[in-house]
Amino acid sequence: MISIVTPVYNEEDNIVFFYNAVTQVMKNTSYDYELLFVNDGSRDKTEMLINQLAQKDSHVRALTFARNFGHQIAITCGMDMACGDAVITMDGDMQHPPELIPVLLEKWREGFDIVQTVRTATEDAGFIKRMTSSGYYAFINSISKTPIVPGGSDFRLMDKKAIQVFRRFREHSRFIRGIVGGMGFKQTTIEFEAPKRHAGVSKFSMKKMLHFAMDGVITNSTIPLHLAFYIGILAALAGGLLILHVIYCYITGSAVPGWSTMTILISLFGSINLMGLGILGEYVGKILEETRNRPLYWLSNDTAMDKSTPYYKA
Ligand code: UDP
Ligand code: MG
């Protein structure tokens, strides 16, 4: 049995189209399947539509969050609840082509536990998004201890055993690509070209995207923290040399306290301090978040999370 997990946020114009496409693909395979929609607190007709589908088709399961928790948490919920021997996560806007599902399944049959897809191109991504994306992946891979496939998407297949391990990762700020990349198991990648969205606009605002990018860095590496430390050492060395210079000037009698020097120094060291503090603040923020130990998500209808769901069994 295959589970297909799809987070949906205000996707009323895509749900039925997506459902039809996935159903057609799955009917042509020899597998039984479930299509698990996780409605991430949509404010449009998404909830109604997925409930309708679940009622008329027993392959469909519909879960609705009490509010918007974000794409990564919605995927996590789906992976917690999925009952399949393999779980495929994919977006509900047709940017992750359902025709690729059989290819993922074939790799799984070949013995791979994790089949990661990689976008070679995205039709509706502008030049800036493409450049920032590739720059970001180069950066994060240079500081991350575990590999993160450049252009990697959250369209992937995971075998049940990898899913069971993944369920034990309970951090709140999560960059699933990083977690999965570092999980080990037998992994492979397949490439695809992401088409345009079927309908609607991207649900990732600039703010959400920046948060996501920041989570990727902060949860994967403590190097920024070390960097602040090293810059601090360099600054201290420069300060030391400066003091020597000042002493020299004092001894030779040419010490004229310069206002401009002071201004430069204050702004220089002030900014270095601020930078270090800023980076520290990011980590402290994360520590705070994790120590709160709040539930990762909750449903508007908590009876749907009955004891028979895999997460409770685990
Ligand atoms: N999504 C979600 N919660 C959010 C934002 C997005 O569940 O807060 C879903 C969205 O409905 C879609 C998938 O995540 O199925 C990917 O989002 P989107 O297509 O907007 O991202 P993009 O493809 O532009 O990166
Ligand atoms: Mg999309």
Image: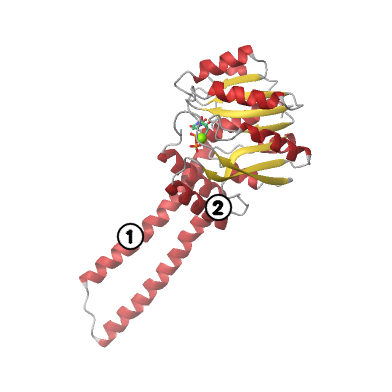
Residue situated in front as seen by the camera: 11 or 212? 11
Quarter of the image for residue 116 reads top right
Whether residue 263 can be seen here: yes
**Of pointers 2 and 1, the one earlier in the residue sequence:** 2
Q: In this view, does 290 lie to the left or right of 187?
A: left
**Neighbour tally class for label 2: few under 14, some 14-19, many 20 plus, Cα within 10 Å:** some
Residue drawn at the location 64% of the way across and 19% of the way down? 60
Q: What residue type is labelled 1?
A: Gly
The correct choice, above or below, for 97 with respect to 35 in the image is: below
The residue under label 2 is which amino acid type? Answer: Ser
Closest to the camera, between mark 2 and mark 1, is 2
Mark sitting on residue 221 = 2
Residue 257's label in the rendered image is: none
Residue 250 drawn at (x, y percent):
27, 82
Q: Residue 154: x, y in percent?
A: 59, 39
Write down the quadrant of residue 264 in the picture. bottom left
Q: Mark 1 points at which residue?
A: 270
Residue at 42% across, 37% down: 205
Answer above or below: position of 260 versus 225: below
Cβ at disc 2 under 8 Å from ligand 1: no
